[in-house]
Amino acid sequence: MTSLTSLTLKGALDGLEAGDFTSVELTRAHIEAVEAARGLNAFLYETPEKALSMAAASDARRALGAAGRLDGAPLGIKDLFCTDGVPTTAASRILEPFVPHYESTVTSQLWRDGAVMLGKLNLDEFAMGSSNETSAYGPVINPWRKSGSNQALTPGGSSGGSAAAVAADLCLGATATDTGGSIRQPASFTGTVGIKPTYGRCSRWGTVAFASSLDQAGPIAKTVEDAAILLTSMSGHDPKDSTSLNVPVPDFAAFVGKSVKGLRIGIPKEYRVDNMPAEIEKLWADGIAWLKEAGCEIVEISLPHTKYALPAYYIVAPAEASSNLARYDGMRYGLRAEGANLTEVYENTRAQGFGDEVKRRILIGTYVLSAGYYDAYYLKALKVRRRIAEDFDSAWERCDAILTPTAPSAAFGLGENSNDPIAMYLNDVFTVTTNLAGLPGLSLPAGLDANGLPLGLQIIGKPLDEGTVFSVAGAIEKAAGFTAKADKWW
Amino acid sequence: MAIDAATVRKVARLARIAEPEERIEALAQELNGIMTWIEQLAEVDTDGVEPLTSVVHAGLPLRDDVVTMGGDADIVTGNAPKSVGGFFVVPKVVE
């Protein structure tokens, strides 16, 4: 019998239903994998006892014929989702020691459907980063290495713990969040599948806020079908989030495997950026060829404001962050530093509690919102944001989905980009546009580079049309036949 | 628009982050680098364009004004650095 941790989510759910193994057995195998993989630094907090009791309860439900969609499946939770009675840090010192007394809507829906929680996963501090190096608890290490090298690589960010844990078979799937690419870039760096759905699909309630108009939750999983199963559970209207969309949630898994014949796939010429590695160009061409083979019509499109997306993002996101993170004042939760007066208490608390990248973004956000600069920067960025959204509106007149590379490189070494903020920000050049426009975007592994590292392709869909995104992803997954796994060294 | 040391001190004060004096120059350079990169937005013609504040094309939903939870002062103050009897304890602000 193959090891229980090498199963896909779908395979494990089928095995549970067939009675091949119990959730307790499946969960125990994953707990052992988590304990053996501490060198990856993927988990910030393990909950093995909670996992085993949830698994036992799941087995009892299944025996009664009352199993839910995810019943008995052990998952990892990005430590940005508040979990009742389990510490939640956002990978920041400023929240220490915060233990929520409530459950985020997204995670509560996973437990409603029977999933089992293995623990909380590492991330960039407040999800601000593209390499996991801004975590106050040290970076996650990518399970993948260049062939013949021991160099520690980044799993990407901010959902680096989620991506690494799935890639290393520590969990059957994981929750993640994406503000500028934080689901898709780590998925691309680790050979996993990640989807950021349409803004408003998943409730933001109980998820630590970074930039509220851009933040969306989504899953990271081993296969396109697994991602679809998880997203179906995570989605849905929530009256507690005023931006949550009150629309029906389809069974996304039903779209995986559907024919893509006749679909028009847009190829945006502006995504051919300077210095793009030839391997990524080739992968993109492969993707186009596979979809053509599957009966799609390939259409060249133009998204003329693409190059302005990142600079606009680095006004909008820090502005929202500076406002959202004002709540960390040392009064109601987390760290409180000493000071001679109230202002000093605030200033010292925030100086000690926040890391350098978070401070940098708060300062930028405060600057662009301050008197005299608001119109020149913040308002200007919001107008450019509309231009970017309009680019997509025009594109949808000519195509049904868009195919692009996910990231401009494969996983890079820890420390390689950490001294140059703008070089780090450029990781999100292909992903950030969908956050600004609120569109669904999925990354799936489609090939390996010359060093044996995974590379991802991204599929962008129309608002609320995750179904087509999953169908196209399913077609590419089938054609690419990507089965590579990281060699176990941990 | 160059961000100078005085601007960094002002912004850090507005953001309530204590930045040590020896960090101010370096921060000014860092922030300048980022803002210079952002300056390229000026190239975009945005005349007559409405700012996009939300990608959700719906009005703000209303709900009934009823109490759905509450009466849990101990839980609410449970994570506070200092609390007494269901109250947050904060530094003195009025002498």
Image: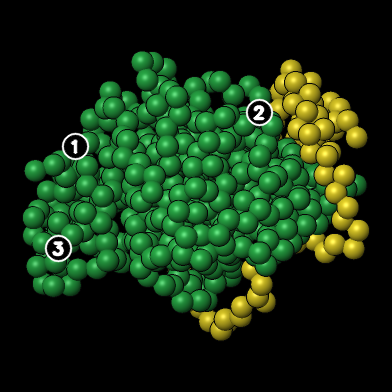
Chain under numbered label 2: A
* Residue depicted at 15% across the width and 41% down the height: A3
Mark 2 surroundings within 10 Å by alpha-carbon count, few (fewer than 14), some (14 through 19), many (20 or more): few
Q: Are marks 3 and 2 in contact (CB under 8 Å)?
A: no
* Residue depicted at 75% across the width and 45% down the height: A308
Q: Considering the numbered disc 3 on the image, is that residue within a helix, a strand or a loop? A: helix
Q: What amino acid is found at the position of numbered circle 1 in the picture?
A: Glu
> Disc count in the image?
3
Q: Which-is-in-front pick, marks 2 and 1?
A: 2
Q: Position of residue B95 (x, y in %)?
A: 72, 46
Q: Give the residue pinned by disc 3.
A: A17
Q: Earlier in the sequence, mark 3 or mark 2?
A: 3
Q: Position of residue A220 (x, y in %)?
A: 40, 49
Q: Which colour represents chain A? A: green
Q: Which colour represents chain B? A: yellow
The relative height of residue B26 versus residue A433 in the rendered view (above or below) is above
The relative height of residue A19 versus residue A406 in the rendered view (above or below) is below
Q: Give the residue pinned by disc 1.
A: A32
Q: Is residue A98 visible?
A: no
Q: Give the residue pinned by disc 2.
A: A275
For the C terminus of chain A, give its image quadrant.
Answer: top left
Q: CA distance from mark 3 to mark 2?
A: 49 Å
Q: Can you tell which quarter of the image residue A363 is in? A: top right
Q: What amino acid is found at the position of numbered circle 3 in the picture?
A: Glu
In the visual, does B15 lie left or right of A53? right
Q: Are marks 2 and 1 in contact (CB under 8 Å)?
A: no
Q: Nearer the viewer, residue B6 or B4?
A: B4
